[in-house]
Image (cartoon, grey):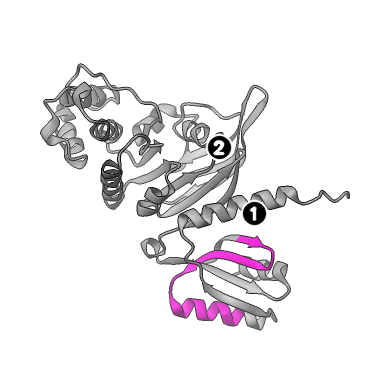
Amino acid sequence: MLSVRHLVFDYPGHRALDDVSFRVEPKTITALVGPNGAGKSTLLRCLAALDRPFAGVVELDGFDIHERPRLAHRRMGFLPDFYGLYDELTVRQCLTYRAAAVGLPRGQWRERVRLAAERMEIMDRLGDKAGSLSRGLRQRLAIAQAIIHEPALLLLDEPASGLDPEARMGLSAVLRQLRDKGMTIIVSSHILAELEDYSTHMLVIRDGKILHHRALDPLSKQRVRIRVEVANGEHKLVEVLSHEGGVTEITLMGTVCTFEYPASAVSRHTLLKHLMAADLHVIEFAIDETGLQEAYLEQVRAAEAARALPKVAR
Protein backbone atom coordinates (compact mmCIF):
# COMPACT_ATOMS: atom_id res chain seq x y z
CA MET A 1 0.00 0.00 0.00
CA LEU A 2 2.37 2.74 1.27
CA SER A 3 6.12 2.28 1.31
CA VAL A 4 8.52 4.88 2.75
CA ARG A 5 12.24 4.34 2.24
CA HIS A 6 15.13 6.38 3.67
CA LEU A 7 13.26 9.68 3.81
CA VAL A 8 15.32 12.78 4.68
CA PHE A 9 13.97 16.31 5.05
CA ASP A 10 15.90 19.36 6.26
CA TYR A 11 14.89 22.81 7.44
CA PRO A 12 17.64 25.45 7.67
CA GLY A 13 19.94 24.25 10.43
CA HIS A 14 17.68 21.36 11.42
CA ARG A 15 17.09 17.82 10.15
CA ALA A 16 13.37 17.17 10.53
CA LEU A 17 13.33 13.64 9.09
CA ASP A 18 16.38 11.40 9.34
CA ASP A 19 16.43 8.19 7.26
CA VAL A 20 12.74 7.38 7.88
CA SER A 21 11.56 4.00 6.57
CA PHE A 22 8.35 2.04 7.17
CA ARG A 23 5.43 0.31 5.41
CA VAL A 24 1.71 0.75 5.93
CA GLU A 25 -0.59 -2.09 4.96
CA PRO A 26 -4.05 -1.51 3.42
CA LYS A 27 -7.18 -1.19 5.58
CA THR A 28 -5.24 -0.20 8.71
CA ILE A 29 -5.24 2.86 10.96
CA THR A 30 -1.74 3.90 12.01
CA ALA A 31 -1.28 6.19 15.01
CA LEU A 32 1.67 8.50 14.35
CA VAL A 33 2.85 9.57 17.80
CA GLY A 34 5.71 11.60 19.17
CA PRO A 35 6.47 14.80 21.12
CA ASN A 36 6.16 18.30 19.69
CA GLY A 37 8.84 18.90 17.08
CA ALA A 38 9.38 15.18 16.47
CA GLY A 39 8.65 15.49 12.76
CA LYS A 40 5.05 14.26 12.60
CA SER A 41 3.60 17.13 10.56
CA THR A 42 6.62 17.24 8.26
CA LEU A 43 6.30 13.52 7.63
CA LEU A 44 2.59 13.84 6.82
CA ARG A 45 3.26 16.69 4.39
CA CYS A 46 5.88 14.55 2.64
CA LEU A 47 3.43 11.62 2.51
CA ALA A 48 0.81 13.98 1.04
CA ALA A 49 3.25 15.03 -1.72
CA LEU A 50 3.07 18.64 -0.52
CA ASP A 51 6.73 18.80 0.57
CA ARG A 52 9.44 17.07 -1.43
CA PRO A 53 12.05 15.27 0.70
CA PHE A 54 15.76 15.90 0.20
CA ALA A 55 16.30 12.15 -0.19
CA GLY A 56 14.27 8.95 -0.11
CA VAL A 57 11.21 7.56 -1.83
CA VAL A 58 7.50 7.41 -0.96
CA GLU A 59 5.48 4.92 -3.01
CA LEU A 60 1.72 4.53 -3.00
CA ASP A 61 0.52 1.33 -4.65
CA GLY A 62 3.80 1.07 -6.52
CA PHE A 63 4.27 4.59 -7.91
CA ASP A 64 6.52 7.39 -6.63
CA ILE A 65 4.19 10.10 -5.31
CA HIS A 66 6.74 12.89 -5.75
CA GLU A 67 7.26 11.97 -9.39
CA ARG A 68 3.49 11.83 -10.00
CA PRO A 69 1.96 14.23 -7.44
CA ARG A 70 -1.31 14.78 -9.32
CA LEU A 71 -2.01 11.06 -9.38
CA ALA A 72 -1.05 10.88 -5.70
CA HIS A 73 -3.51 13.66 -4.81
CA ARG A 74 -6.30 11.76 -6.58
CA ARG A 75 -5.50 8.66 -4.52
CA MET A 76 -5.23 10.31 -1.10
CA GLY A 77 -6.95 12.79 1.19
CA PHE A 78 -5.15 15.10 3.62
CA LEU A 79 -6.45 17.12 6.56
CA PRO A 80 -3.75 19.37 8.05
CA ASP A 81 -3.69 20.54 11.64
CA PHE A 82 -4.80 24.03 10.62
CA TYR A 83 -7.43 23.76 7.92
CA GLY A 84 -9.70 26.40 6.45
CA LEU A 85 -13.38 26.39 5.54
CA TYR A 86 -15.33 28.99 3.60
CA ASP A 87 -17.62 30.16 6.39
CA GLU A 88 -20.08 31.90 4.07
CA LEU A 89 -20.64 28.76 1.99
CA THR A 90 -23.17 26.11 2.97
CA VAL A 91 -22.00 22.60 3.77
CA ARG A 92 -23.32 21.47 0.38
CA GLN A 93 -21.43 24.24 -1.39
CA CYS A 94 -18.21 23.43 0.47
CA LEU A 95 -18.44 19.79 -0.56
CA THR A 96 -19.39 20.63 -4.15
CA TYR A 97 -16.46 23.04 -4.41
CA ARG A 98 -14.11 20.35 -3.12
CA ALA A 99 -15.51 17.79 -5.60
CA ALA A 100 -14.73 20.19 -8.43
CA ALA A 101 -11.28 21.02 -7.02
CA VAL A 102 -10.16 17.38 -6.96
CA GLY A 103 -11.28 16.92 -10.56
CA LEU A 104 -14.37 14.77 -10.18
CA PRO A 105 -16.64 14.83 -13.25
CA ARG A 106 -19.56 17.26 -12.84
CA GLY A 107 -22.04 14.42 -13.23
CA GLN A 108 -20.68 12.80 -10.04
CA TRP A 109 -20.74 15.85 -7.79
CA ARG A 110 -24.25 15.41 -6.37
CA GLU A 111 -23.76 11.73 -5.54
CA ARG A 112 -20.29 12.23 -4.05
CA VAL A 113 -21.59 15.08 -1.88
CA ARG A 114 -24.37 12.83 -0.63
CA LEU A 115 -22.03 9.92 0.11
CA ALA A 116 -19.48 12.07 1.94
CA ALA A 117 -22.19 13.78 3.99
CA GLU A 118 -23.76 10.44 4.88
CA ARG A 119 -20.44 8.96 5.97
CA MET A 120 -19.72 11.94 8.20
CA GLU A 121 -23.35 12.12 9.43
CA ILE A 122 -23.90 15.74 8.34
CA MET A 123 -26.75 15.18 5.85
CA ASP A 124 -29.06 17.29 8.00
CA ARG A 125 -26.54 20.17 7.85
CA LEU A 126 -26.17 20.48 4.08
CA GLY A 127 -28.07 23.78 4.05
CA ASP A 128 -26.21 25.30 7.02
CA LYS A 129 -23.34 27.71 6.54
CA ALA A 130 -19.96 26.36 7.56
CA GLY A 131 -19.42 29.35 9.85
CA SER A 132 -22.44 28.37 11.96
CA LEU A 133 -21.19 24.86 12.76
CA SER A 134 -19.72 23.71 16.06
CA ARG A 135 -16.05 22.68 16.26
CA GLY A 136 -16.98 19.01 16.03
CA LEU A 137 -19.24 19.51 13.00
CA ARG A 138 -16.60 21.66 11.28
CA GLN A 139 -14.16 18.80 11.76
CA ARG A 140 -16.65 16.38 10.20
CA LEU A 141 -17.11 18.73 7.25
CA ALA A 142 -13.34 19.02 6.80
CA ILE A 143 -12.96 15.24 6.78
CA ALA A 144 -15.89 14.95 4.37
CA GLN A 145 -14.01 17.27 2.02
CA ALA A 146 -10.90 15.11 2.37
CA ILE A 147 -12.75 11.89 1.48
CA ILE A 148 -15.20 13.15 -1.15
CA HIS A 149 -13.15 11.51 -3.92
CA GLU A 150 -13.00 8.23 -1.95
CA PRO A 151 -9.21 8.14 -1.49
CA ALA A 152 -7.32 4.94 -0.80
CA LEU A 153 -5.21 6.73 1.81
CA LEU A 154 -6.35 9.35 4.34
CA LEU A 155 -3.81 11.46 6.26
CA LEU A 156 -5.02 13.35 9.35
CA ASP A 157 -2.87 15.75 11.39
CA GLU A 158 -4.22 16.25 14.94
CA PRO A 159 -7.88 15.71 13.95
CA ALA A 160 -9.08 15.66 17.58
CA SER A 161 -7.43 18.96 18.50
CA GLY A 162 -9.92 21.30 20.16
CA LEU A 163 -12.75 18.76 20.20
CA ASP A 164 -14.80 18.09 23.32
CA PRO A 165 -15.03 14.48 24.64
CA GLU A 166 -18.32 13.77 22.83
CA ALA A 167 -16.95 15.03 19.51
CA ARG A 168 -13.80 12.95 20.01
CA MET A 169 -15.88 9.83 20.52
CA GLY A 170 -17.79 10.65 17.36
CA LEU A 171 -14.53 11.08 15.44
CA SER A 172 -13.32 7.68 16.68
CA ALA A 173 -16.49 6.03 15.40
CA VAL A 174 -16.18 7.75 12.02
CA LEU A 175 -12.57 6.63 11.52
CA ARG A 176 -13.44 3.05 12.39
CA GLN A 177 -16.28 3.16 9.84
CA LEU A 178 -13.96 4.51 7.14
CA ARG A 179 -11.48 1.74 7.84
CA ASP A 180 -14.26 -0.86 7.68
CA LYS A 181 -15.13 0.48 4.22
CA GLY A 182 -11.58 -0.20 3.06
CA MET A 183 -9.75 3.08 3.66
CA THR A 184 -6.17 3.18 4.97
CA ILE A 185 -5.61 5.96 7.52
CA ILE A 186 -2.61 7.57 9.20
CA VAL A 187 -3.47 9.79 12.18
CA SER A 188 -1.12 12.10 14.03
CA SER A 189 -2.23 13.05 17.53
CA HIS A 190 -1.12 13.78 21.09
CA ILE A 191 -4.32 12.24 22.52
CA LEU A 192 -3.18 8.66 22.98
CA ALA A 193 -6.38 7.43 24.65
CA GLU A 194 -8.47 8.29 21.60
CA LEU A 195 -5.87 6.84 19.23
CA GLU A 196 -6.01 3.54 21.06
CA ASP A 197 -9.78 3.38 20.49
CA TYR A 198 -9.43 3.04 16.73
CA SER A 199 -5.78 2.50 15.75
CA THR A 200 -4.48 -0.84 14.53
CA HIS A 201 -0.80 0.17 14.46
CA MET A 202 1.53 2.59 16.23
CA LEU A 203 4.42 4.46 14.61
CA VAL A 204 6.66 6.31 17.09
CA ILE A 205 8.79 9.19 15.82
CA ARG A 206 11.28 11.22 17.86
CA ASP A 207 13.90 13.71 16.69
CA GLY A 208 13.04 12.85 13.10
CA LYS A 209 13.75 9.12 13.54
CA ILE A 210 11.37 6.17 13.69
CA LEU A 211 11.76 4.55 17.11
CA HIS A 212 9.18 1.82 16.80
CA HIS A 213 6.45 0.40 14.54
CA ARG A 214 4.07 -2.21 15.89
CA ALA A 215 0.59 -3.66 15.53
CA LEU A 216 -1.98 -2.75 18.19
CA ASP A 217 -5.02 -4.67 17.00
CA PRO A 218 -3.91 -8.28 16.46
CA LEU A 219 -7.40 -9.54 15.67
CA SER A 220 -7.64 -7.23 12.65
CA LYS A 221 -4.88 -9.11 10.82
CA GLN A 222 -4.79 -12.30 12.86
CA ARG A 223 -1.37 -11.39 14.21
CA VAL A 224 -0.10 -10.71 17.70
CA ARG A 225 2.92 -9.08 19.28
CA ILE A 226 5.05 -11.75 20.95
CA ARG A 227 7.42 -11.02 23.84
CA VAL A 228 10.36 -13.39 24.35
CA GLU A 229 13.03 -13.12 27.05
CA VAL A 230 16.10 -15.32 27.07
CA ALA A 231 18.72 -15.89 29.77
CA ASN A 232 21.52 -15.54 27.24
CA GLY A 233 22.09 -15.45 23.49
CA GLU A 234 19.76 -12.55 22.67
CA HIS A 235 21.59 -11.84 19.40
CA LYS A 236 21.28 -15.48 18.43
CA LEU A 237 17.56 -15.17 19.22
CA VAL A 238 17.24 -12.31 16.74
CA GLU A 239 19.13 -14.32 14.13
CA VAL A 240 16.86 -17.33 14.59
CA LEU A 241 13.72 -15.19 14.44
CA SER A 242 14.88 -13.41 11.29
CA HIS A 243 14.88 -16.78 9.50
CA GLU A 244 11.44 -17.81 10.76
CA GLY A 245 8.53 -17.41 8.35
CA GLY A 246 5.85 -14.99 9.53
CA VAL A 247 8.08 -13.05 11.95
CA THR A 248 8.11 -9.28 11.33
CA GLU A 249 8.99 -6.03 13.13
CA ILE A 250 11.62 -7.50 15.45
CA THR A 251 12.69 -5.22 18.31
CA LEU A 252 15.44 -6.11 20.80
CA MET A 253 15.77 -4.37 24.17
CA GLY A 254 18.37 -6.01 26.38
CA THR A 255 17.48 -9.67 26.72
CA VAL A 256 13.84 -9.07 25.69
CA CYS A 257 12.75 -9.36 22.07
CA THR A 258 9.32 -8.47 20.70
CA PHE A 259 7.98 -9.16 17.22
CA GLU A 260 4.79 -9.75 15.25
CA TYR A 261 3.69 -13.28 14.48
CA PRO A 262 0.53 -15.17 13.40
CA ALA A 263 -1.98 -15.35 16.25
CA SER A 264 -2.59 -19.08 15.93
CA ALA A 265 -1.72 -20.98 19.11
CA VAL A 266 -0.35 -23.81 16.96
CA SER A 267 1.99 -21.41 15.17
CA ARG A 268 3.24 -19.97 18.47
CA HIS A 269 3.85 -23.43 19.90
CA THR A 270 5.83 -24.42 16.80
CA LEU A 271 7.95 -21.27 17.05
CA LEU A 272 8.70 -21.92 20.73
CA LYS A 273 9.86 -25.43 19.89
CA HIS A 274 12.17 -24.00 17.22
CA LEU A 275 13.70 -21.57 19.72
CA MET A 276 14.32 -24.30 22.26
CA ALA A 277 15.81 -26.53 19.57
CA ALA A 278 18.30 -23.73 18.89
CA ASP A 279 19.59 -24.12 22.50
CA LEU A 280 18.08 -20.81 23.62
CA HIS A 281 17.16 -20.64 27.32
CA VAL A 282 13.68 -19.08 27.04
CA ILE A 283 12.54 -17.40 30.26
CA GLU A 284 9.35 -15.84 28.91
CA PHE A 285 7.27 -16.44 25.78
CA ALA A 286 3.97 -14.56 25.83
CA ILE A 287 1.64 -12.26 23.93
CA ASP A 288 2.57 -8.63 24.56
CA GLU A 289 -0.65 -6.78 25.43
CA THR A 290 0.90 -3.44 26.28
CA GLY A 291 -1.49 -0.53 25.67
CA LEU A 292 -0.73 2.34 23.31
CA GLN A 293 0.22 4.89 25.95
CA GLU A 294 2.41 2.50 27.91
CA ALA A 295 4.01 1.25 24.69
CA TYR A 296 4.76 4.80 23.59
CA LEU A 297 6.28 5.76 26.93
CA GLU A 298 8.30 2.56 26.93
CA GLN A 299 9.87 3.48 23.59
CA VAL A 300 10.60 7.04 24.74
CA ARG A 301 12.24 5.80 27.93
CA ALA A 302 14.33 3.33 25.95
CA ALA A 303 15.48 6.09 23.60
CA GLU A 304 16.41 8.38 26.50
CA ALA A 305 18.28 5.56 28.23
CA ALA A 306 20.22 4.85 25.04
CA ARG A 307 21.20 8.52 24.81
CA ALA A 308 22.43 8.50 28.41
CA LEU A 309 24.81 5.60 27.82
CA PRO A 310 28.45 6.69 27.53
CA LYS A 311 29.85 6.46 24.02
CA VAL A 312 32.53 3.82 23.69
CA ALA A 313 35.52 4.82 21.61
CA ARG A 314 36.40 2.39 18.86
- 115 on left or right of 312: left
Residue found at the far right of this picture: 314
Q: SS at mark 1? A: helix
How many numbered dots are placed on residues in this image? 2
Under circle 2, the secondary element is strand
Q: Residue furthest front?
A: 164
Q: Is residue 23 magenta?
A: no
Instruction: Give the residue at x 23% y 30%.
Output: 134
Crowd band around label 2 with a 10 angstrom C-alpha radius: few (<14), some (14–19), many (20+): many
Examine the rendered structure and indicate whether residue 292 appears above or below residue 80: below
Residue that appears at 13% across and 31% down: 125
User: Disc 2 to disc 1, how far (Cα)?
Assistant: 28 Å
**Neighbourhood count class around disc 1 (C-alpha, 10 Å): few under 14, some 14–19, many 20 upward:** some
Q: Nearer the viewer, residue 302 or 278?
A: 302
- On the question of residue 104 being in view, the answer is yes
Q: Which residue is mark 1?
A: 302
Q: Is residue 28 visible?
A: no
- Residue 47 percent coordinates (x, y): 47, 35
The amino acid on which the numbered mark 1 sits, given as a three-letter code, is Ala
Residue for badge 2:
57
State which quadrant residue 120 falls in: top left
Residue 204, horizontal then vertical, whole percent: 54, 47
Q: Using the image, determine if residue 69 lies above or below residue 299.
A: above
